[in-house]
Image: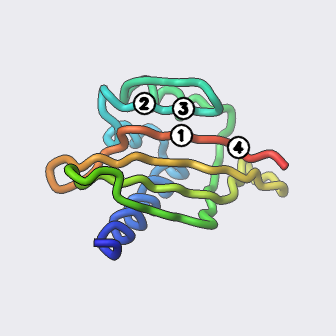
Amino acid sequence: MAANIDAVATQFVEFYYKTFDSDRTQLTSLYRDGSMLTFEGAQIAGATSITDKLVNLPFQKVLHKVTTKDAQPSSSSVASLLVSVTGLLVVDDSPNPLQFSQIFHLMPEGGSYYVFNDIFRLNYA
């Protein structure tokens, strides 16, 4: 089961950040009305509100560089998983990338997964 979880997490993380970095408006399909994003301490609920928040972040260009990715099952009764990501965020071609951490709680739905919970933090030294 661990190999399957790691494969799902890897595929999700690659898709999420590729989509985020190229067209944030396309992230809506990864969330549901019951989803919640905690972004730098602010809680946002629902797919539309979450996407609005991400689309309106104060930068034009962004590139996520994933450093670590860890995943584990989050329930004994549902094939859900927790994915923890750390990495670097290059914003508007800045020479000084920002460190970030993000945790996703993925829930199964129709042979795929959606983001039930998403917690994002910049990590300041």
Residue at 29%, 50% (x, y): give it.
75
Residue at 38%, 65% (x, y): give it.
11
- Mark 3, residue position: 38
Up-down relation of residue 47 to residue 99 (above or below): above
Earlier in the chain: of badge 1 and badge 3, it is 3
Relative depth, front residue between 57 and 5: 5
Three-letter code for the amino acid on which mark 4 is drawn: Leu
Left or right for 25, reference 63 = left
Using the numbered discs, state the Cα–Cα distance from disc 2 to disc 3 in whole angstroms. 7 Å
Earlier in the chain: of badge 2 and badge 1, it is 2
- Mark 2, residue position: 36
Q: Quadrant of residue 63?
A: bottom right
Using the numbered discs, state the Cα–Cα distance from disc 4 to disc 1 in whole angstroms. 11 Å
Relative depth, front residue between 26 and 97: 97
Left or right for 99, reference 111 = right
**How many residues crowd around disc 2 within 10 Å: few (fewer than 14), some, or many (20 or more)?**
many
- SS class, disc 3: strand
Q: Where is residue 119 in the image (x, y as percent from the top left)?
A: 53, 40
- Mark 4, residue position: 122
